[in-house]
Amino acid sequence: MSLHFQLLNLKSQGFYDDILKTNNYLKYGIFTGIVRVAQAGIFSDLNNLKVNTILNKNYEEYFGLLENEVEKMLLDYNIEYKIEDVKTWYNGYKFGNINVYNPWSILNYVDNKELKAYWVNTSSNVVIKEMLKNSDSRVFKTLEDLFAKKDVPVTISDNIALGKHLSPSEIWELLLFSGYLTIKEKVDEDEYIVRIPNQEILSFFKEES
């Protein structure tokens, strides 16, 4: 773990402690993010945290657009005949037990009427691209299996230790929680089958592999 990472952790820990633990004017707070960071100590002084991830059923219907919501939106914009194409490109994310669409991509599609990658182009994806570039042959073999729609089992611990080189299992975990993969089914306590959610994400992987 680098010195900069340690200093950032220390600053963040004090910041969150001041806001959430010693603030008499705050009833509760909500944090959102991509991954639950392990071994960082950012929230070590906070003992009343409630964590919900894409693996939980709590609030599952609020993480994206439901199919009936997308169908109504397309109907309102007179493009309901494109629903199957829209499903192929932007549907496929599983939150808890519910399948949802990517809201950003849907809104951009409705605005532009063009099927293309919107969400994956909202940032530089530097971290993901660098991670894939430095991965070994096992990772690319698994990507080939994902392209072929084969079942890919992974272990999800829900605690990624950032600030170090990621193991292959942590790579899949980061890709899952970042939106580049989704759950197909649960196999065991921490074992899941993952897949590429839709054409938008598939186009990103094929470009980078």
Image: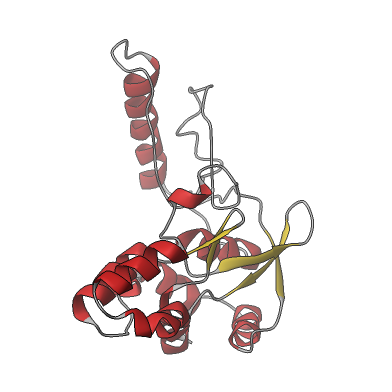
- Horizontal and vertical percent for residue 165? 54, 61
- Horizontal and vertical percent for residue 195? 60, 74
Task: Name the residue at the top extreme.
Answer: 24
Left or right of 14: which side holds 49? right
- Horizontal and vertical percent for residue 32? 39, 43
In the depicted view, which residue is nearer to us: 118 or 170? 118
Residue drawn at x 54%, y 52% is 54
- Horizontal and vertical percent for residue 59? 50, 44
Left or right of 28: which side holds 187? right
Question: Could you tell me how many numbered marks the image carries?
Answer: 0
Q: Quadrant of residue 140?
A: bottom right
Instruction: Decide if residue 84 is in sight here.
Output: yes
Image vertical order of residue 51 relative to residue 72, above or below: above
In the depicted view, which residue is nearer to us: 149 or 106? 106
Residue drawn at x 31%, y 67% is 73
Residue drawn at x 39%, y 70% is 71
Left or right of 141: which side holds 196? left
Describe the colour scheme in one phrase. Answer: secondary structure
Residue drawn at x 69%, y 83% is 150
In the depicted view, which residue is nearer to us: 73 or 93? 73
Image vertical order of residue 59 relative to residue 135, above or below: above
In the depicted view, which residue is nearer to us: 70 or 153? 70
Instruction: Decide if residue 124 is in sight here.
Output: no
